[in-house]
Image (cartoon, rainbow, N blue to C red):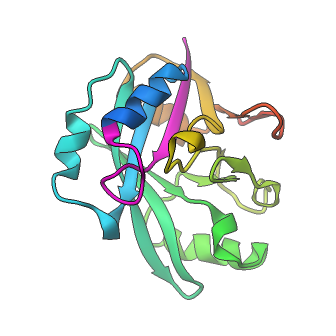
Amino acid sequence: MLLRGQLHIHTTYSDGRLTPQQAADRYAELGFDFIAFTDHDHLLKPSYRKAIEDVKSGMVVFFGIELTVGTSMGYVHVSRIESLGYTLHTFNHPGDYDITLKQTIACIDHVAQIYDIDAVEVTHHGFYTPEFDTDEIPYPKIASDDSHTILGCGRAWIEMEAKRDRNTIVTAIKAGEYTNCYAKGQAKAIVLA
């Protein structure tokens, strides 16, 4: 079954403008099969986990947090998504940090000593950043929205052939078995092996 997913969503529980339910409803309207909420660790409001657990949706909904990690290059963000004993870590939006590719690679290496990095985003708020879609960064690349508003929903996503099951989805992502997709007018989809 072809699944469409989004792994980087912010809500009113940190700096987003949509409640978790509103964000889920929007992604369902856009035809998504799974989503992950990843609100900022340092901005989290109380009862975040419960709010995510209370979302009513036909989609598979993952709980996550966008971690703030200190490095010699400054602070960077890593999404941690949980799934029944599995954890997925994505190094987020390298285009945000205003550092060179070489510095980005060093930064990812530093973060990888703290968290097992499973993927690196090649998007900035859903827009393709090709300079980070390079074999010099030795991780699967992933497209995501990093949505904060309704207009930020549906710019970039992943698609995969998989069962609609939490652990199957995470296992496929960890293996790089998905395709990056972008809204019309952006870069063509990139197939990852």
State which quarter of the image contains the N terminus.
Answer: top right
User: In the image, what residue occupies the spot 76% across and 55% down?
Assistant: 129
Is residue 177 something that shows in the picture? no
Q: Is residue 50 left or right of residue 57?
A: left
Quarter-of-image position of residue 109: bottom right
Q: Is residue 96 left or right of residue 43?
A: right
In the rendered image, residue 9 lying in the magenta stretch gets the answer yes
The answer to which of 188 and 85 lies nearer the viewer is 188
Asked if 1 appears above or below 68 in the picture, the reply is: above
Residue 178 location, x and y as percent?
63, 31
In the rendered image, residue 191 lying in the magenta stretch gets the answer no
State which region is magenta: 1-20
The answer to which of 9 and 193 lies nearer the viewer is 9
Quarter-of-image position of residue 63: top left
User: In the image, what residue occupies the spot 69% across and 58% down?
Assistant: 138
Furthest-bottom residue in this view: 72
Residue 50 location, x and y as percent?
17, 43
Q: Is residue 181 left or right of residue 113?
A: right
